[in-house]
């Protein structure tokens, strides 16, 4: 239970910073959607470019964060050498990327559909290069268990980003969507300065033999990462090329804005990953590790299902994150995207079996299959069904990858997950979700009251069977 407690504690720190950070970042959604109408297509530009950013970040870090954790905890490696080798490698590749994009800026911008605004692409290329390099110092903070510093810097970056956006778009009444990308660059440079102690004060050493071993471990993670990020972003990158309507950027903006509401699942999964990954590799030989895996999976699913019900149940309030009602036609994608995010989180949890036995090629296979499913759904159905096909494509892709990882994992690294209990929670959450549909035509206060009752039923089941209040410290004595 000690490691499980540690995971919960670190997840609380990472999660709090992630949740607060995402909440603050949500302030940009009402700001942008209030400033730009859906018809303008400006939010579609933001959605499209940041999809490319996410893919580029995976390419430039190429699995070296996970590889860094793995090799730092190997007994025959020097952690400082591992860190220096990782910094030099990621930094060099990021620099080459930025230079090449700037040299080929015109044709790349034309290909992406931004021939009239190549500065959008150029600014983001430089930003991505710096961000990719900074991923390694941030991974170092996680490995050193400096969760508070990690969280503080992440929050600082978001708060300054919001402040600069408010100054330009609200107080100065700015109208140029390009300033979104210039502000991002300014904040990334600020982070690089704040992290200077994490890449100074020691000898930078590139160990070529170590690098070969690290690359051998990381390349399947790169394939996994590419497939994984395509599961999240391919729809937003493909949409301009396969959607047949003249309102392409408007529709993409609607989908991108409403999907933001569903990102609470991404917050939970990200916080979980930040805390879980270093601990898993550090304790790979511990006897109680298998029990920790299965318990963590169960509680992850329980609390993400609870989050799902809360978001869906209070959609009448959360929809105001997207300030302009022009975008609300896309709210129907929220439950689908959230369900897909839950499956992505489960898939991430399952992924440790092949990372621990150094068979990361399996991750590439599973993610590749899931990505192929997503791409097929988008290519076939987006021309007819628009952004709804994007949402269902992600659902199908993550679902296939999750199931494949589970069944193959049970052969190579069998774990006794509490499947029956998990299935019962999933069925209960689905029934409560469908019951929420009964109040769709009620007055808003009636809907909120009814949905609150349904959410409390789910909480009561958790307390009854898996989180008895009598066993909690301090307050437990009042429930015995």
Image: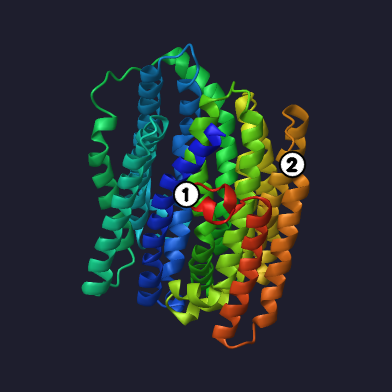
Q: Does 167 appear above or below 49?
A: below
Mark 2 — residue? 404
**Mark 1 → mark 2, Cα distance in angstroms:** 43 Å
Q: Which mark is residue 474?
A: 1
Residue at 51% over, 71% down: 254
Residue at 38% over, 24% down: 83
- Asked whether residue 341 appears in the rendered view, the answer is no
Q: Where is residue 255? Give x, y as percent.
A: 54, 68
Q: Element at badge 2? A: helix
Is residue 190 rendered to the left or right of residue 307? left
Residue at 57% over, 56% down: 479
Q: Element at badge 1? A: loop
The N terminus appears in which quarter of the rendering? top right
Q: Quadrant of residue 381?
A: bottom right
Is residue 303 rendered to the left or right of residue 137? right
Q: Where is residue 363? Give x, y as percent.
A: 64, 35
Along the viewing direction, whichever of 151 and 64 lies nearer the viewer: 151
């Amino acid at each position: 239970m000690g490691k499980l407690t540690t995971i919960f504690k670190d997840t609380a720190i990472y999660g709090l910073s992630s949740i607060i950070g995402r909440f603050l970042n949500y302030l940009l959604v009402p700001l942008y959607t209030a400033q730009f109408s859906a018809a303008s297509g400006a939010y579609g530009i933001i959605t499209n470019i940041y999809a490319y950013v996410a893919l580029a970040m995976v390419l430039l870090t190429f699995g070296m964060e996970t590889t860094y954790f793995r090799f730092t905890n190997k007994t025959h490696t020097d952690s400082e050498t591992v860190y220096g080798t990782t910094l030099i490698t990621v930094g060099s590749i990021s620099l080459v990327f930025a230079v090449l994009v700037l040299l080929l800026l015109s044709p790349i911008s034309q290909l992406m559909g931004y021939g009239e605004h190549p500065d959008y692409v150029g600014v983001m290329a430089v930003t991505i290069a710096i961000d990719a390099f900074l991923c390694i110092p941030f991974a170092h903070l996680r490995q050193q268990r400096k969760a508070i510093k990690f969280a503080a810097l992440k929050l600082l970056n978001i708060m300054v980003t919001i402040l600069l956006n408010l100054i330009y778009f609200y107080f100065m009444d700015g109208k140029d969507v390009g300033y979104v990308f210039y502000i991002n660059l300014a904040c990334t440079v600020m982070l690089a300065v704040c992290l200077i102690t994490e890449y100074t004060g020691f000898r930078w050493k590139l160990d070529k033999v170590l690098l070969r071993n690290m690359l051998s471990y990381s390349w399947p993670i790169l394939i996994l990462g590419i497939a994984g990020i395509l599961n999240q972003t391919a729809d937003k990158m493909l949409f301009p090329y396969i959607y047949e309507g003249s309102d392409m950027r408007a529709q993409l903006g609607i989908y991108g804005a409403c999907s933001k509401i569903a990102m609470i699942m991404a917050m939970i999964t990200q916080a979980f990953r930040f805390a879980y990954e270093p601990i898993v590799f550090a304790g790979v030989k511990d006897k109680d590790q298998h029990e920790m895996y299965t318990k963590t999976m169960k509680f992850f699913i329980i609390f993400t299902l609870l989050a799902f019900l809360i978001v869906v149940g209070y959609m009448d309030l959360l929809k105001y994150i997207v300030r302009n009602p022009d975008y609300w036609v896309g709210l129907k994608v929220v439950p689908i995207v959230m369900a897909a995010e839950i499956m992505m989180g489960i898939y991430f949890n399952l992924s440790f079996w092949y990372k621990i036995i150094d068979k990361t090629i399996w991750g590439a296979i599973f993610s590749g299959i899931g990505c192929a499913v997503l791409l097929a759904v988008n290519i076939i159905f987006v021309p007819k069904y628009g952004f709804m096909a994007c949402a269902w494509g992600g659902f199908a892709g993550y679902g296939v990858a999750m199931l494949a990882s589970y069944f193959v994992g049970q052969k190579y690294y069998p774990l006794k997950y509490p499947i029956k209990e998990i299935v019962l929670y999933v069925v209960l959450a689905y029934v409560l979700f469908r019951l929420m549909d009964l109040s769709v035509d009620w007055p808003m206060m009636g809907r909120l009251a009814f949905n609150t009752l349904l959410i409390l039923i789910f909480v009561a089941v958790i307390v009854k069977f898996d989180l008895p209040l009598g066993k909690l410290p301090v307050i437990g004595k009042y429930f015995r």
